[in-house]
Amino acid sequence: MGPVELQLMDLIEPTVAAMGYELVGIEYLGQGQHSRLRVFIDQPTGISVDDCEQVSRQVSAILDVEDPIRGQYALEVSSPGLDRPLFKLEHFARFVGQLIKLRLRQARAGQRNFKGTISAVTEGQIELTLDDGVVLKLAFTDVDKANIVPEFG
């Protein structure tokens, strides 16, 4: 997450938590008039449309008062979904054994995109076992984006 997302997390996380939800993460896609702010929430029993509406109203009120983002944007509140984004190191630890795809901030051996299974998470490091058995040790701070790969069947 970038500085805008981190600022927004600090701003809205207490309210979302007080409502009984986990603030999974935030994505801000600045694209002029078509900018979007995505807020991902979760709870053990799952997320309904009503949950999203309630959180959207509260978050919208906070953002209207604090005005942390210049210009127009659309606010989207949703569950993390099947291809759940992993924003925090704790998320990687929670999903050890799961297949993920991730993109690094900078290329490693000429490659930025990887797909593999989270085999361990220790001291800011993520171990990713690729399909060919190669184990990569990646610093969490080097990860730009990561998502669970849904497995069906």
Image (cartoon, rainbow, N blue to C red):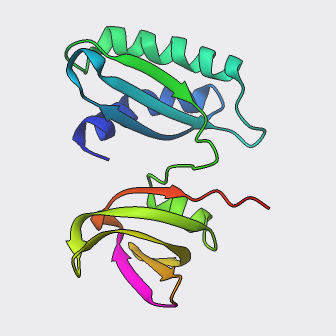
Q: Which residue is drawn at 19% across and 17% down?
A: 70
The residue at the far bottom in this view is 133
Q: Where is residue 71 in the image (x, y as percent from the top left)?
A: 21, 13
Q: In which quarter of the image is residue 10?
A: top left
Q: Where is residue 91 in the image (x, y as percent from the top left)?
A: 53, 58
Q: Residue at x 57, y 30 (%)?
A: 78
The answer to which of 67 and 129 lies nearer the viewer is 129
The answer to which of 31 and 63 lies nearer the viewer is 31
Q: Give the range drawn in magenta.
A: 133-139
Q: Where is residue 67 in the image (x, y as percent from the top left)?
A: 27, 14
Q: Quadrant of the C terminus?
A: bottom right
Left or right of residue 153: residue 100? left
Q: In which quarter of the image is residue 66?
A: top left
Left or right of residue 49: residue 84? left
Q: Where is residue 15 in the image (x, y as percent from the top left)?
A: 51, 25
Seen in the picture, residue 11 relative to 42 is either above or below; the reply is: above
